Image (cartoon, rainbow, N blue to C red):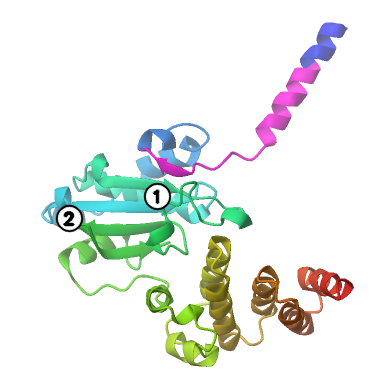
């Protein structure tokens, strides 16, 4: 009887362990890491089943892949990464890219380290969506593919390497990069309405700038995050979620009156927004 109970206990523990979410693969990693479980569960079939366009691959082979390096920022927790990463690696291998010219950087998903690597290997890369495939020649970025290809991975890569006009998905990210470089987003006098007018035609959905805001918050760039999220509420003035996110940024910055104002606006737009309701109560209680 004791033996049966012990076996049952072991079985229960094994079942519980199997239910635990896998720890993400983070930091600089290798292809061998992806070939290990639990990552091989999606990486191996994704790699084997994808068939790159042979004609486009032949063109890629002529573009001196040995002089090109690819930095890939991804999340093993991210559905887009699970889909596109194996396909890209299959394409690169078919086109003659050496593994030594491919750098893999895994990032976290939790809010405190959102889309960051342990040693901040992604810090200077301005990545807001994963996966992001960044193409370098002569140590200079010549293009990138954000989250998903515009045409196909191999066609997008061929355009980038051949110097053809190419604009990746999430077109606003290039503008965000420029604003960060010039210090505009840290300028408290910057006009969110004016910034919104500049990127209005480039932004595809409210999540585009929202994701930027959360990445900046996780980095500790609160002024910049607030500027981006203020821009977003001008673009999507009826979105409860956008006002909720802006309230969160102000709260993190310790500007509770501003946070309360935007959380209350979020509740006005969506009376069922449970997070905003809870934050309003918390902020009022602290007054």
Residue at 47% in and 62% down: 129
Q: Which residue is mark 1?
A: 85
Q: What element does badge 1 sit on?
A: helix
Q: Is residue 236 left or right of residue 71?
A: right
Crowd around label 1: few <14 · some 14–19 · many ≥20 (10 Å): many
Residue at 38% in and 33% down: 32
Q: Quadrant of residue 49?
A: top left
- Pointer 2 or 1: first along the chain: 2
From the top left corner, tell me how far across and down residue 69 is, in percent: 24, 51
Does residue 135 sit above or below 166 in this rendering?
above
Q: What element does badge 2 sit on?
A: helix
Residue 15 visible, this orientation: yes
Which of these two is toward me, 17 or 24? 24
- Mark 2 → mark 1, Cα distance in angstroms: 18 Å
Q: How many marks?
A: 2
Q: On the rendered image, what quadrant is the C terminus found in?
A: bottom right
- Magenta stretch contains residue 13: yes
From the top left corner, tell me how far across and down residue 144 is, in percent: 32, 63
Identify the magenta region.
Answer: 8-30
Q: Which residue is mark 2?
A: 60
Does residue 279 sit above or below 198 in this rendering?
above
Residue at 61% in and 55% down: 112
Contact? badges 2 and 1 (CB < 8 Å)? no
Which mark, residue 131? none
From the top left corner, tell me how far across and down residue 93 is, in percent: 25, 44
Q: Quadrant of residue 172?
A: bottom left
């Amino acid at each position: 009887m004791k033996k049966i109970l012990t076996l049952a206990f072991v079985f229960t523990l094994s079942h519980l362990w199997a239910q635990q979410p896998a720890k993400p693969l983070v930091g600089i990693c290798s292809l061998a890491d992806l070939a290990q479980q639990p990552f091989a569960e999606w990486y191996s079939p994704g790699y084997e089943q994808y068939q790159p366009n042979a004609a486009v691959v032949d063109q890629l082979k002529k573009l001196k892949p040995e002089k090109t390096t690819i930095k890939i920022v991804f999340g093993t927790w991210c559905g887009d990464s699970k889909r596109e990463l194996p396909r890209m690696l299959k394409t690169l291998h078919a086109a003659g890219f050496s593994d030594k010219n491919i750098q893999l950087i895994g990032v976290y998903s939790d809010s405190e380290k959102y889309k960051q690597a342990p040693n901040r290997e992604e810090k200077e890369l301005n990545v807001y969506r994963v996966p992001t495939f960044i193409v370098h020649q002569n140590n200079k970025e010549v293009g990138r593919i954000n989250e998903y290809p515009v045409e196909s991975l191999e066609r997008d890569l061929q355009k980038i390497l051949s110097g053809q006009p190419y604009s990746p998905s999430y077109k606003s990210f290039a503008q965000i990069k420029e604003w960060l470089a010039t210090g505009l987003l840290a300028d408290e006098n910057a006009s969110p309405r004016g910034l919104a007018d500049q990127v209005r035609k480039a932004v595809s959905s409210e999540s585009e700038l929202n994701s930027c805001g959360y990445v900046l918050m996780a980095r500790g760039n609160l002024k910049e995050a607030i500027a981006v999220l203020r821009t977003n509420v001008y673009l999507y003035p009826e979105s409860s979620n956008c006002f909720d996110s802006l309230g969160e940024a102000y709260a993190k910055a310790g500007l509770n009156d501003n946070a309360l104002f935007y959380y209350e606006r979020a509740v006005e737009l969506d009376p069922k927004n449970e997070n905003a309701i809870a934050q309003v109560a918390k902020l009022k209680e602290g007054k």
